[in-house]
């Protein structure tokens, strides 16, 4: 019997939980419906970890807790993106 795997796609409605990007390109808690706009790909190329900070609405509360909890992968991702943004400007 074949094992079904979830496809890795952006959910129809998701929220960005990373740090604000200068110039207003992305803001913390910004909601996207119907997928992400094409210009997000530019940021994924500059800072690949940023992709991990887009979460389905259903996971919003859990992800917020994990970002604030030191030592979690989510907290590390937030820090990596914040440091990278200081260099990218």
Image (cartoon, helix red, strand yellow):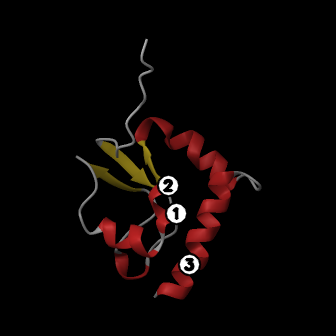
* Spot occupied by residue 39 in the image (x, y as percentages of width and height): 26, 69
Q: Which of the two labelled residues, at mark 1 and mark 3, occupies the earlier sequence position?
A: 1
Q: Secondary structure at mark 1?
A: helix
In whole angstroms, how far apart are the C-alphas of marks 3 and 2?
A: 14 Å
Give me the residue at 23% from left, 64% from top: 38
CB of mark 1 within 8 Å of CB of mark 2? yes
Figure label count: 3
Extreme residue toward the right, this view: 71
Q: Secondary structure at mark 3?
A: helix
Is 49 left or right of 79, judged from the image as shown?
A: left
Residue 43 in percent (x, y) is at: 38, 71
Q: Which residue is mark 2?
A: 52
Q: CA distance from mark 1 to mark 3?
A: 10 Å
Quadrant of residue 4 in the image? top left
* Residue of label 1: 49
Circle 3 residue: 84
Q: Earlier in the sequence, mark 3 or mark 2?
A: 2
In the image, is residue 80 above or below residue 87? above
Dot 1, how many residues are within 10 Å of its Cα: few (below 14), some (14-19), or many (20+)? some
Badge 2 marks a residue whose secondary structure is: helix
Residue at 39%, 42% (x, y): give it.
8
Could you tell me residue 57's position as x and y percent?
41, 40
Residue drawn at (50%, 38%), measured in percent from left and top?
Answer: 59
Vertical placement of residue 89 versus 81, above or below: below
Task: Look at the image and tell me in which quarter the N terminus lies.
Answer: top left
Q: Are marks 1 and 3 in contact (CB under 8 Å)?
A: yes
Q: CA distance from mark 1 to mark 2?
A: 6 Å
Q: Hey, which residue is sitting farthest front in the picture?
A: 1
Local crowd size for mark 2, using a 10 Å CA cut-off: few (<14), some (14–19), many (≥20): some
């Amino acid at each position: 019997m074949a094992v079904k795997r979830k496809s890795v796609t952006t959910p129809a409605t998701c929220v960005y939980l990373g740090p604000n990007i200068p110039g207003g390109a992305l803001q913390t808690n910004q909601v996207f419906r119907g997928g992400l706009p094409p210009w997000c790909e530019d940021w994924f190329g500059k800072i690949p970890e940023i992709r991990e900070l887009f979460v389905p609405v259903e996971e919003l509360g859990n992800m917020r807790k994990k970002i604030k909890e030191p030592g979690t992968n989510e907290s590390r991702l937030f820090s990596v993106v914040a440091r990278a943004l200081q260099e990218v400007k």
